[in-house]
Amino acid sequence: MKRALLIGLTVLMAVACKKVTIEERIDSISAYFSQHENPYVERLEQLADGQRIDYLTYTLLKDLRAREAWILDEGENESLVAAFPSRKAAEGQLSAITVSLDDPAACAAALHLIKACKDLKIKSKNNLRVLFYAPAPDSAGKSGLVSFRRDLRDAGEIISLDIHLTSLDSLPPHTFVIEENPGFVERFLEVIPPYFKPLGEYSFIKGTYPNPDWPLNTATCRYNLDAEDLQNETAAVTILSFLLN
């Protein structure tokens, strides 16, 4: 009887400890977004700019359990930063997700990405910062990014990867733009695209690095979301985030 119990426990432990493959994890992400509609987009579209930041702050802290959230004050404008910790992160090494506050579809996609990762227990290797940045008052529309860079510098923190989401760009659909050093991009293009083949037609192209028009001055992956297909679009971005982390 003891021997049978021991064998049974050993089998259960083996099943419990079975390593989930990358393909299985990608399938679970796809299934999640096929079963869960974005709970944030409609509300964000209804809110004026001044109300949007309050809603985002509440959602990040209450619903998504951010460790903390704070405002970057830029005179007449404000940006919002939220912090999500990782168990194994090196001190000062961060990953980032950046979206403009005037883009409710991108804001909703960022929230849903975080929710999916929490529900599926996907952890980033780095501590995560999510920035909802003010697009004004500078003509380039990136004043919030400048404040974010200053905030990081003051804290002695470095962004190793920024995933920038927008639904307002002119990039072709299903196209990821990778702004990194040539060696990384070459390896990226060998490893990452095959995982997307079961999902549909996605393109991966090399961007300018360093990008003189991007104030964060860091490795960046850009994606232009189709707001009419936000579920599948957010699934693709979540899969990329998982693969890169």
Image: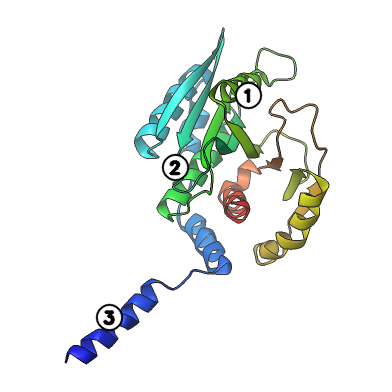
Amino acid type at image mark 2? Pro
Amino acid type at image mark 1? Arg
Per the image, the residue denoted by label 3 is: 9
Q: In which quarter of the image is residue 223?
A: top right
Q: Quadrant of residue 30?
A: bottom right
Left or right, residue 169 beside residue 98 = right
Count residues near mark 1 (Cα–Cα under 10 Å), then give few for <14, some for 14-19, many for 20+: some
Mark 2: which secondary structure?
loop
The dot on residue 149 is 1
Per the image, the residue denoted by label 2 is: 39
* Residue 30 visible (yes or no): yes
Left or right, residue 191 beside residue 7 = right
The dot on residue 111 is none
Query: Mark 3 vs mark 1: which is more N-terminal?
Result: 3
Residue 119 drawn at (x, y percent): 41, 52
How far, Cα to Cα, is label 3 from label 1? 52 Å
What residue is drawn where x is 70% and y is 35%?
218
Image mark count:
3
Residue furthest to the left in view is 1
Residue 62 drawn at (x, y percent): 34, 34
Residue 187 drawn at (x, y percent): 77, 57
In this rendered view, identify the residue nearer to me: 5 or 80: 5
